Image (spheres, rainbow, N blue to C red):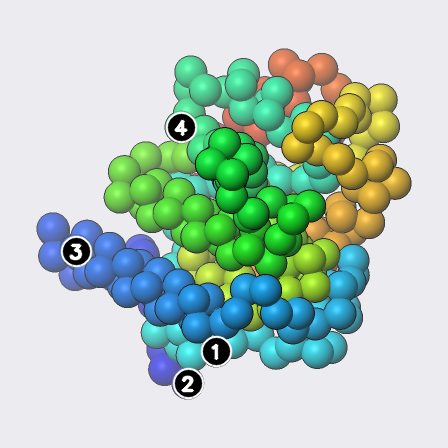
Amino acid sequence: MGRRFCFHEIDVLGGWISDVVVLFIVDAAALAILLLVSAKDVNSTWIAASTRSDRWLAGVASPITLRSVIHASASNLFILTGAPGSGKTAILARLRDELWCVDEPAREVLAEQRASGGSGTWDQNPSLFVHLLLQRSIEKYQMAVRSGKKAVFDRGIPDCVVYAIRAGTDPRPSLTAVDVYRYHPHALFLEPWRDIYTTDEERIMSFDETLSFSETLRDVYMRSGYRPVDVPRGSVDDRAAFVREMIDRSGVVP
């Protein structure tokens, strides 16, 4: 296989040329992934629905075509992820004055689809929902890369793999994106917490379902090369302080 590249290696080219090269590769990879997604019938069922990533791994090999071209690890892009209703939104609300917090794409997609009368929602067409979720997640990643700022994402592209598994749709476009669009290797992780869990119009899982979601999510992140860092339970302020400290302590990881 060809040599992998990452942003800090490309940067040694120097000056504005390196920035152009990075953005060109990121955009080219995005186009390739979206063409791959578009080439598939998002209404087709590619694999049996599963809530465990070992079944996904047993049936689908991780794509290697794009990862031989670029393996970009953005050390200033952080993921805060975890089970639904585990407190991500509250933590990020505390950090917005200090960091660029990238909103969760799933809620945006669902709200837009319902407002426009589209069918790309989990209850109507989960395959289309996953397709739109991946598109939006890549767009948010590209925006953060272009900004050059330190950013914290409410869920990352690896989360799309979990949604694909649960929807019973083809996870390979999401797997390809996971391999191309890299974040800081430490993923901040929130475990399910029954005491704070609530449902709403968009969050319809039972608490027991969030346990299996969390198990699959952790497995996907670890198999994707990330190291989950558990955020301790506590007050919102204490949890936000932990996230802030972890980000401040994180340097460039080779």
Q: Quick one: which residue is furthest to the right in this view?
A: 208
Residue occupied by mark 4: 100
Q: Residues within 10 Å of mark 2 (few under 14, many from 20)?
A: few
In the displayed structure, 5 sits above or below 79; it is below
Q: Which residue is label 2 attached to?
A: 1
Q: Label 3, label 2: how many angstroms apart (C-alpha)?
A: 25 Å
- Indicate which disc, 1 or 2, sits on the residue closer to the N terminus: 2
- Percent x, y for residue 175? 54, 66
- Give residue 137's position: percent from left, percent from top: 46, 47
Residue depicted at 51% across the width and 76% down the height: 63
Taking the spot 26% from the left edge, 44% from the top edge, the residue there is 146
**Tag 1 residue:** 64
- Tell me the distance, in whole angstroms, between the alpha carbons under discs 4 and 3: 23 Å
Between disc 4 and disc 2, the foreground one is: 4
Q: Residue at x 43, y 52 (%)?
A: 135
Tag 1's secondary structure? loop
Q: 45 or 235: which is nearer to us? A: 45
* Mark 3 neighbour density, 10 Å: few (under 14) some (14–19) many (20 or more): few
203 or 253, nearer to the observer = 203
User: Looking at the image, which is closer to me, 111 or 166?
Assistant: 111
Q: Amino acid at mark 3?
A: Val
Q: Earlier in the sequence, mark 1 or mark 3?
A: 3
Q: Amino acid at mark 1?
A: Ile
Q: Give above or below for 237 relative to 176.
A: above
Q: CA distance from mark 4 to mark 1?
A: 32 Å
Residue 148 place in picture, x, y as percent: 28, 39
User: In the structure shown, which secondary structural element does the residue marked by tag 3 occupy?
Assistant: helix
Q: Assess whether mark 2 and mark 1 are in contact (beta carbons under 8 angstroms).
A: yes
> Callout 4, which amino acid?
Trp
Of all residues shown, which one is farthest toward the left?
16
